Amino acid sequence: MTRSPLRRKIIVAALSTLLTVAGTQVATAAAPPPAGGVAIAAPATFTHPGVLVSRPQLEFMRTKVLANAQPWKSAYDQMMGSKYASLTRTPKPRAVVECGSYSNPNYGCTDEREDAIAAYTLSLAWYVTKDARYADKAIQIMDAWSPVIKDHTNSNARLQTAWSGSSWPKAAEIIRYTYTGWPAANATRFATMLRTVYLPEIQAGLANTNGNWELSMMEASIGIAVFLEDKAAYDRAVSIFRTRLPAYIYLTSDGALPKTPPGSGIDTRAEIVSYWHNQSTFQDGVSQETCRDFTHTGYGLAAAAHIAETAHHQGQDLWGENQDRMRHAYGLHARYQLEAMPSWLCGGTRNQNLGPTTEVAFNALNTRLGIAMANTQRYTEQQRPQGTDNLFIAWETLTHAQNPA
């Protein structure tokens, strides 16, 4: 089969990335130079818990649930009624998780992602109830995986690593820093798992894929970096985020064409249009995956929001740096989730749904920064309580709705 010039260039870029990743399988690579002249600043002292949710946010959530206030109580009831909050769950660890495209094959992929979400769910249940059974169950799940998992393989290995690796540190942060029952040796073993199995697979990024992959990889990387208190890993994740986000969300200030991921090999107009799934008209907020479908776009936007939120808890204002890009992206996609698509965008056809992806960004931009976001607000409030996508997003109405912390 004859490959297109863009396809050949992407393959070359992919091989380059694979060689880079292969050289970073043991130690965390040093952070690259700052992007765009903006200083990268891993905190002098990391804040814990500080992966997606902070202690003040957890306290706000708990206070609202115990007061039976809405929408937090209905979100909490939704979470507690899910399979992820079960105290009888049996974790299903395996040494090698093999994940192919479209989940074929699926050897441990669903089990790993869902066990990680369960650990996070149980940690939230612990924080609200202060019932040690939930914390102990979260620990049981984390302790089941940490001595067993050794590798992720097949074509979706990096995405699988990213999705699971996004949930694990959220759970571990809450348990380690709000509960005294996790043995130090077990927590250390869990940290070793994150450092040796997860981080090497994702930390270098993957510029030649659809953007939701690399953004999810950086979400997991920054969360793991916080749990490990690894400043180099933190700075690397922020640096890659700062170049990927402008290549994922277009603003008219970028110029006539969207930016492209460094190292992707995509540089001509024809290649950019192809990479943007044949979208050739660019307006504020259009995403590289908009015309693929809204579901994958939602993955990318949610991962970007999670990165900015974790950085916020660590004292870094990625929200301020990217508020225009993020508000336009969420506004455009929320609007056309609720209304008919215009003919200039994806030929007037929307594929799939945005999903439970807006609470973190809406809270950061609207509640904390005071930015009016009418379409995002409409969508967010209609979707409450936003639950889980069973991949890496979970219970964000509970944790972030109108949360000022």
Image: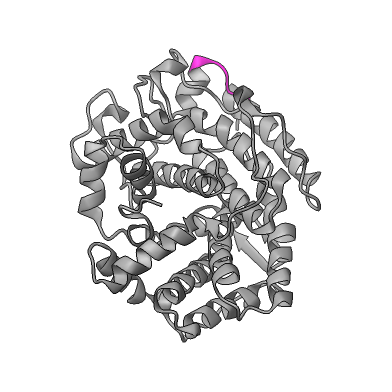
- Foreground pick, 323 / 155: 323
- Foreground pick, 248 / 346: 248
Q: Can residue 2 be seen at all in this image of the molecule?
A: no
* Residue 388, above or below 235: below
Quadrant of the image occupied by residue 71: bottom left
- Foreground pick, 330 / 397: 397
Q: Is residue 58 left or right of residue 353?
A: right
203 part of magenta stretch: no
Residue drawn 48% across and 61% down? 55
- Number of numbered discs on residues: 0
Magenta residues? 264-269
Residue drawn 20% across and 42% down? 338
- Foreground pick, 190 / 309: 309
Tell me which secondary structure the magenta stretch mostly adopts.
loop
Residue 212 location, x and y as percent? 49, 42
* Residue 238, above or below 273: below
Q: Can residue 138 be seen at all in this image of the molecule?
A: yes
Residue 26 location, x and y as percent? 81, 53
* Residue 377, above or below 208: below
267 part of magenta stretch: yes
Q: Is residue 107 left or right of residue 373?
A: right
Looking at the image, the residue that sits furthest to the top is 256
